[in-house]
Image (cartoon, rainbow, N blue to C red):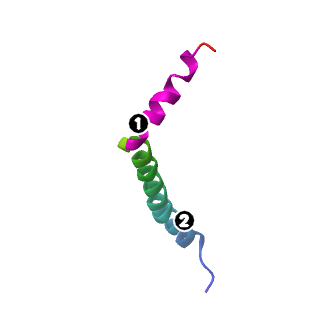
Amino acid sequence: MDPTYKAVAEFAQTWGLVYFTVIFIGVLLYALWPSRQQQFDEAARIPLRED
């Protein structure tokens, strides 16, 4: 059976949304994880350092 454009587009829209939602939640969890706060605070101060 040859997939039609409509079937492929529906599949891509549905699973693409699921894929990007999962990726977004993963990145959000990584950025807001409490043990990462010190690492991000140090990185935020890099431009202010005078070496």
Q: Secondary structure at mark 1?
A: helix
Front one among 50 and 15: 50
The reply to whether the magenta stretch includes residue 46 is yes
Q: In the rendered image, which residue does mark 2 sit on?
A: 9
Q: Eyeballing the image, is 27 above or below 1?
A: above
Total labels drawn: 2
Task: Write the start and end of the magenta stretch as one range.
Answer: 35-49
Residue for point 46% across, 58% down? 17
Residues at marks 1 and 2, CA–CA distance in whole angstroms: 40 Å
Task: Name the amino acid type tagged 2.
Answer: Ala
Task: Name the amino acid type tagged 1.
Answer: Gln
Residue for point 48% across, 65% down? 15
Front one among 47 and 18: 47
Q: Eyeballing the image, is 41 above or below 8?
A: above
Q: In the rendered image, which residue does mark 1 sit on?
A: 37
Q: Position of residue 41 (x, y in %)?
A: 45, 29
Q: Position of residue 23 (x, y in %)?
A: 48, 54
Q: Residue furthest left?
A: 34
Front one among 1 and 51: 51
Residue 14, numbered label: none
Residue for point 44% across, 47% down? 30
Residue for point 54% across, 65% down? 9
Q: Eyeballing the image, is 51 above or below 29?
A: above
Name the quadrant containing residue 48. top right
Q: Eyeballing the image, is 8 above or below 23?
A: below
